[in-house]
Amino acid sequence: MDNILVLGIESSCDETAAAVVKNGREVLSNVINTQIAIHKQFGGVVPEVASRHHIENIDAVIDKALSDAGVGFSDIDAIAVTYGPGLVGALLVGVSSAKALSYALDIPLVGVNHIKGHIMANFIAHPDLEPPFVCLVASGGHSHIVWVKNYQELEILGRTRDDAAGEAFDKVARVIGLGYPGGPLLDKLSKEGNKNAVKFPRVTMAQGSLDFSFSGVKTAVINYLHKLDQNGESYNKADIAASFQDAVTDVLCDHTIEAARQKKSKIITIAGGVASNSQLREKMTERAKKFGIDVLFPPPILCTDNAAMIACAGYYEYLNGNRADMTLNAVPSLSI
Ligand code: KG4
Ligand code: ZN
């Protein structure tokens, strides 16, 4: 088959991104314009501000993706765009741009689920990876254990009942005064701390359930610090960070490995922003090895929001004949 070039467009949260990917797995360009510096001053993403910056940046980001790849619109076989889940105003910017380009240039349009995109980032990072496998996808808004049956079908084996793992990281980081985005800062600080300093709860749901709950551990950290504060006692931030991170990664690893054992899968992949977490990567690799399970994850640049993963997911949708039309809309709470 001829080479297929997909232009991916991503604007679901605070990254305006575009990428050109060849045959689903070869990244020709991957342009990410992050708004972290802008939202930092507010301590989190302000949706309205995010939408406005997407509008300002998206044309230049798409142009750069094409020029970095050394191609023009006439070389593009399909445009893949994230249409959910995410912030509605932010999603609409990407969806509207993709629709306009598709209509004006007569290029097929494909709608992509952002979470599916995160999972597919593993296909870019690992050219020989084939389904089926188990994937832990953990980001700022989602934490799912997914059985990736093939390039189209995904089955959710477990999910968070409350906070997403990344959300818990961000909240605890804020409580201990680390700033935004909290996950990477907490990860870094944990390296200097003692993970056994405080035993925070490892919450599991009903027996046999692979679901997560992270609001309990977050509250446990807040209560612990509150008590110290009331008693006028100080604490070591790095110890709190390391102890919290150890509790969260324990549960993420144990449930994911249990899922892989149930599915008799010899491969676990990790995806989403939290997949950049250094302890999660090490712990999952080490624990899974005992069961003969290999652990794969993308490099950090493909874990956090990017459009290469959207182009990859879009490629497989395109091959499957899935096409969107001009009625494609943003779906903020789109499920997998
Ligand atoms: O996938 P992503 O870029 O955006 C969403 O779709 O949400 O994930 C962002 C989340 C944030 O909560 C961020 O704090 C977290 O991923 N994150 C991390 C690390 N890097 C990013 N959490 C823990 N450790 C990290 N190294
Ligand atoms: Zn994401």
Image (cartoon, helix red, strand yellow):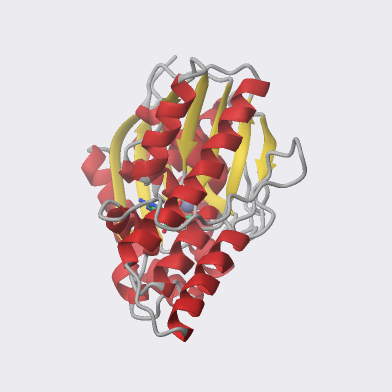
From the viewer's perspective, tell me whether residue 63 is left or right of residue 9.
Answer: left
**Of 335 and 175, the residue lying toward us:** 175
Residue 137 location in percent, x, y? 53, 42
At 58% from the left and 54% from the top, the residue drawn is 201
At 62% from the left and 29% from the top, the residue drawn is 258
In the rendered view, would you say 318 is above or below 225? above
The answer to whether residue 32 of the structure is visible from this angle is yes
**Of 198 and 264, the residue lying toward us:** 198
At 55% from the left and 20% from the top, the residue drawn is 131
The answer to whether residue 24 of the structure is visible from this angle is no
In the rendered view, would you say 314 is above or below 96? above
In the rendered view, would you say 196 is above or below 39? above
From the viewer's perspective, tell me whether residue 263 is left or right of residue 76.
Answer: right
Residue 333 location in percent, x, y? 66, 58
Q: Quadrant of residue 234?
A: bottom left
**Of 201 and 71, the residue lying toward us:** 201
At 38% from the left and 22% from the top, the residue drawn is 3
**Of 186 and 272, the residue lying toward us:** 186
In the rendered view, would you say 56 is above or below 184? below
Q: Quadrant of residue 27?
A: top left
Residue 295 location in percent, x, y? 44, 26
From the viewer's perspective, tell me whether residue 303 is left or right of residue 238.
Answer: right
From the viewer's perspective, tell me whether residue 330 is left or right of residue 169.
Answer: right
**The N terminus sits in image quarter:** top left
